[in-house]
Structures are given as C-alpha cells and as structure tokens.
C-alpha cells in the first residue's frame, strides 16, 4: 500500500539563524527529503544575517537543495507612501511592531504569509492540495523550553495547508547541538535571526549595530512617539536588572543615548527634525497620488535619511532632507 505522505512535498522554513541552519545541514546528511528551502526577507535583517544568506544558499546549491528568497508584497496602503519592508511599514504608519504592544509577533505577516503566497504558485504544492494532501513544513524549533511553547502553539492551530514537523525536537537537539553541527560542517555560525530593532533584542545586540541602523531605531521611535501611550518604545517597559537580566530602559533611543552609541546632538536632531520632514513629505505624496502624480515609495525617503542623518544641519531646511527628495511630479503610469 502506498503511503500518501510520500507524495507530500517538503518545504523548510529557513530563518537564516542557528537552529534552522543546523536542521537543514543534518537533514541533508541523513538523506532526508527537502524539496524547497524558503527564506522570508523582512527588509530589516541584521547585516550579519544578510552576509550569511548567500554563503548558506551556495552550500544548499552545492548539495542539490533548491532555495528561494520571498518577500511580503503589500497591495493596499492605508497611508502613503507605499512600503516594501517592515522598517518602511513602521515609518509610513507611524507605529511600532505589534510585539512592542504585546500583540503577538510580526512573523505571520512578514514571514509565514509570503512563504505561503509563494507556495500557492508552486506546482508540487498545488498538486498536493488538489489531491487532499498537505505540504510538510519543517520548522527549526529546538528542544528547549521556549521552542516547546512555540511548537505547541503552532500545533494547536488546525492548518489546512501544512503538516508541521520539528526535526530538532525529534532528535533532542538544543542550541549548543546546533552550533556544533554548523561548526562541524565548516560553516560560519550565523547570528540570531531577527529584525535589528526587535523587541526581543538584548542590549549587546543593540550595541553591536552599525550607526546607520542605530539612527533608524531612533527614527522609528520618534516617528511613533505621538501614538505611544502604554509603552516607552521598542523595548516596551524598563527591565530592572533582576534575576540575571541586564537593566535597560523601555526605549531603545534612551539606551543608545545613555551608552553613547550615537552623539547626543545627532539623536536630538533626528527626534526633532526627521519625523517633521517625513510627515511633510507624506502629505505631499498623498496629495500627488490624488492628483495622479508619480508615486514615490518610502524607500526613497529612507535612502535620503540615511545619507543626511549623520549631518545635524542636513535633516531639514532648504538643502536638507525634505528638499533633497525633490518634487513630486509627472503622471502615474
């Protein structure tokens, strides 16, 4: 009798972190089936993660494992300009990630949804679903307590499309086992996979960020500040430093200031001037959209911000950030 599961395609949800990377390496070594490896790019990955992705994709290709990078593609926008990354989403809407407000995580919108959107056009998945089968999705939850909670929460959902499997948990592997497996393969150990401004980031992770990303953190919190009532910032509330945890404020900007990671004048210039410049430009874009003009995207503003943010006098004024974006002109295609 044929096992129906043998006809189910297998996708790996790869986060480019330690657990999922080690899981893939060991699956390949054991000769287990992998039909596709998917990485969902939020557009807010750490530089070290971005550097590791091509390294491991080259390893996958050398071992005959196909991989794809997928991205969330918004189609409707409540506010203008349009955004294509999580960072741009926060700046367009003037808010923080949902996790900062205790409303779950960003993973459904920016990770799971784009992977599923890709799979809906993938012939093996289409064939399996048409036959009443599910796609097997391999997830890198390890045998630790935190991932035990995540796995139980995932299994509690009646997913009509996917049968979840957690090989690391089957093998009893923890994070240290995963690190050893990656090292044994001769590959660099990737950093924790997360957005650079993640609420779950530890202080040392913020200390390690380049200045361009520290400036973006200050901008994100400053842009969201008018709407913040119950939380102080991306870290939500202060940590007092008990039970071995490092003390820190609820605002990452306050931490960056206290640690001297950016100059105080630079931080103040971003807080006072950049959100004002952004709101003015958003109004011009919205007006232009209504008139049928070109529709510049948020990436344009962020690019100019990154270029000017290190210059205190470049954040506003006749030759500053807003003016540097140029006029909204032309007709929409």
Image: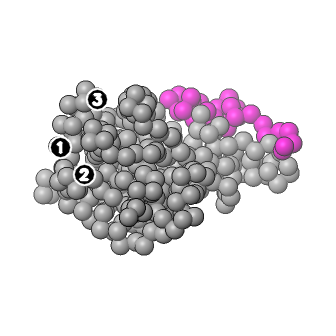
Please provide the residue range marked out in magenta. Answer: 304-333
Q: Are marks 1 and 2 in contact (CB under 8 Å)?
A: yes
Please state which of residues 275 and 138 is positioned toward the viewer in this rendering: 138
Nearest to the eye among marks 3 and 1: give it: 1
Q: For mark 3, what is the residue?
A: 188
Left or right: 311, with 287 as reference point: left
Q: Which mark is residue 177?
A: 1
325 in the magenta segment = yes
Our reading of the magenta stretch's main secondary structure is loop
Q: For mark 2, what is the residue?
A: 168
Q: Indicate which disc, 3 or 1, sits on the residue closer to the N terminus.
A: 1
Q: Residues within 10 Å of mark 3 (few under 14, many from 20)?
A: some
Q: For the view shown, which residue lies furthest in the front direction?
A: 1
Q: Quadrant of residue 136?
A: bottom left
Q: Secondary structure at mark 2?
A: helix
Nearest to the eye among marks 2 and 3: give it: 2
Above or below, 301 relative to 100: above
Q: Position of residue 40 (x, y in %)?
A: 48, 46
Q: Position of residue 167 (x, y in %)?
A: 27, 53
Left or right: 325, with 16 as reference point: right
Left or right: 27, with 83 as reference point: left
Q: Secondary structure at mark 1?
A: helix
Q: CA distance from mark 2 to mark 3?
A: 19 Å
């Amino acid at each position: 009798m044929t096992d129906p599961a043998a006809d189910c395609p297998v996708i790996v949800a790869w986060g480019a972190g330690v657990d999922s990377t080690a899981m893939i390496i060991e699956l390949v070594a054991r000769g287990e089936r992998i039909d596709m490896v998917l990485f969902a790019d939020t557009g807010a990955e750490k530089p070290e993660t971005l550097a590791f992705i091509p390294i491991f994709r080259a390893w996958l290709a050398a071992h005959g494992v196909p991989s794809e990078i997928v991205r969330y593609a918004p189609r409707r926008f409540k506010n203008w300009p349009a955004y294509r990354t999580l960072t741009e989403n926060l700046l367009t809407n003037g808010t923080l990630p949902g996790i900062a407000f205790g409303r779950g995580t960003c993973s459904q919108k920016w990770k799971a949804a784009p992977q599923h959107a890709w799979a809906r056009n993938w012939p093996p998945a289409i064939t399996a679903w048409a036959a009443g089968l599910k796609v097997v999705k391999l997830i890198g939850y390890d045998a630790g307590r935190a991932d035990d909670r995540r796995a139980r929460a995932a299994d509690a959902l009646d997913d009509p499309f996917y049968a979840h499997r957690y090989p690391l948990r089957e093998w009893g592997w923890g994070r240290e086992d995963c690190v050893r497996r990656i090292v044994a393969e001769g590959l660099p150990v990737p950093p924790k996979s997360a957005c650079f401004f993640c609420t779950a980031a530890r202080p040392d992770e913020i200390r390690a960020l380049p200045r361009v990303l520290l400036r973006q953190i200050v901008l994100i919190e400053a842009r969201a500040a008018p709407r913040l009532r119950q939380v102080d910032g991306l870290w939500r509330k202060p940590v007092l430093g008990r039970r071995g945890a490092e003390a820190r404020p609820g605002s990452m900007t306050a931490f960056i200031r206290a640690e001297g990671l950016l100059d105080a004048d630079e931080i103040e210039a971003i807080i006072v001037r950049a959100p004002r410049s952004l709101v003015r430009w958003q109004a011009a874009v919205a007006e232009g959209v209504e008139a049928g003009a070109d529709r510049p995207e948020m990436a344009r503003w962020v690019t100019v911000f990154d270029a000017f943010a290190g210059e205190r006098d470049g954040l506003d004024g006749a030759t500053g950030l807003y003016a540097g974006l140029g006029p909204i002109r032309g007709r929409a295609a």
